[in-house]
Amino acid sequence: MYNQLFSYISRYSESPLTVEDETLIKSALKPAKLKKKELFLEQGNICQYTGFIIKGAMRQYSIDSAGNEHIIQLALENWWMVDRESYLMKTPSVYNIDAWEDTELLILEADDLQRLLEIPTIKEMFWKMNQSSFIASQKRLNNSIALPAMERYEQLLKSYPDFVQRFPQHIIASYLGISKETLSRVRSKLFQK
Amino acid sequence: MYNQLFSYISRYSESPLTVEDETLIKSALKPAKLKKKELFLEQGNICQYTGFIIKGAMRQYSIDSAGNEHIIQLALENWWMVDRESYLMKTPSVYNIDAWEDTELLILEADDLQRLLEIPTIKEMFWKMNQSSFIASQKRLNNSIALPAMERYEQLLKSYPDFVQRFPQHIIASYLGISKETLSRVRSKLFQK
DNA sequence: AGAAAACGATGACATTTGTCAATAAAGAAC
DNA sequence: GTTCTTTATTGACAAATGTCATCGTTTTCT
């Protein structure tokens, strides 16, 4: 299970991990399990952990005044899941995070993260991960303000085909910012072409 | 003009800059000026510089197939402006960046950035800046998929009141992902309350 | 100062998307 | 294996937002 993380790190960083590095990482990241629908973070609480998904599927979402869920992030194997604002600033989160499938994780507390960042390889990995997260978020934002529903869905099919396999349509719809009925209609138009 | 940048850095970082640090920074960031409407980055080109705005106002936007501009970022004094994806990966950008007011900048090439990142204070500043950028982008994304036009505008008024002072309504509308007419109507409803 | 361009408001209408309700199929739970 | 829940589709209608055109005002340019 740690090998999966090590291999992830090596893909993001030039320099290899030493044996001591690996020991430190193992002491900082602890295995955890979530049942389907189990909460990893509840709205109003402070996000205590960053999770690295070994196996499973998770979602991060807000709930509006009408009680509707709005999915701001979906994540599968080899993704990090955390509400960064809450985790870093130690402020109550406005988001929920839960498991969509039974999920195995490695979890990391904020203090332990600080220790790990002493390792240059780890620092480099998180640096690049931050960059990619921001770039991905900005792309999604651009799609959201610039494209109609159908094209947003087509972009998603291209960028994250796995999502469509692993999450039901109403989750995908919420991720795209449209209603499940609209997504259903978009799909029927798309496939009759 | 460099003092403004130094003061910005000191607000983002614990440790102070040494005189040698300041010399290195001065050699890496070069002054530049843009006239209103002048392009800083043109769609299809590789983004060569990161700009730190000393004075002025800039926008980053995409242009869709119908020729409409979609603003993905606005920036004023003490903001960084760059298409990070293009700058880091050296790939052609899908965005334009231009000046909305006559603007003074300090510009930084990618190679020089790498040199600057050797300075821990600078590294820390960019680290935090990356975090904030991501958090801000995710918030805006959440607003975009979760809130109707009027509430998005109210959020903007709270979060970035300066934008409304410095940019005309059609720019703000594009930033929010709505038409200028809709924004005009939203405003008249809002103020008659 | 005068002309041109940019800006903002508004009406009429079109389009997109959302909401609600009904239905059927697929999957999960016991 | 049967019941309950979840998922997906579809129709009818409502609401939000976009488009196009017009007008008056302000700003910019020379």
Image: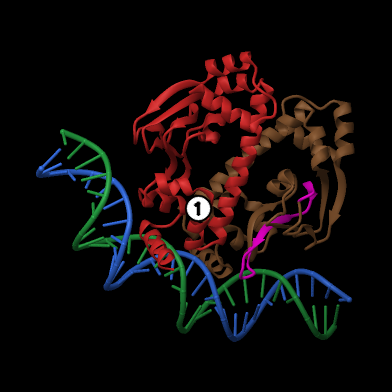
Chain colours: A red, B brown, C green, D blue
Please state, as top left, top right, bottom left or bottom right, where the C terminus of chain A lies in the image: bottom left
- What residue lies at 90% left-to-right and 32% top-to-bottom? B23
- What residue lies at 66% left-to-right and 21% top-to-bottom? A119
The x, y position of residue A190, in whole percent, is: 44, 64
- In depth, the one of A58 and B3 nearer the eye is A58
Query: Would residue B116 be visible to someone looking at this image?
Result: yes
The x, y position of residue B51, in whole percent, is: 78, 47
The x, y position of residue B19, in whole percent, is: 88, 27
Q: Which residue is mark 1?
A: A156
- What residue lies at 56% left-to-right and 56% top-to-bottom? A143
Q: Quick check: B22 above or below B181?
A: above
Tell me: B11 left or right of A21. Answer: right
Label 1 marks which chain's residue?
A
Identity, as a three-letter code, of the amino acid under mark 1: Leu
Q: Is residue B62 magenta?
A: yes
The x, y position of residue B88, in whole percent, is: 72, 43
Query: Would residue B52 be visible to someone looking at this image?
Result: no
Instruction: Determine the image quadrant of residue A115.
Output: top right
Disc 1, SS = helix
| Count of numbered marks | 1
Magenta stretch? B47-69
- What residue lies at 40% left-to-right and 36% top-to-bottom? A98
From the image, give the main secondary structure of the stretch colored magenta: strand
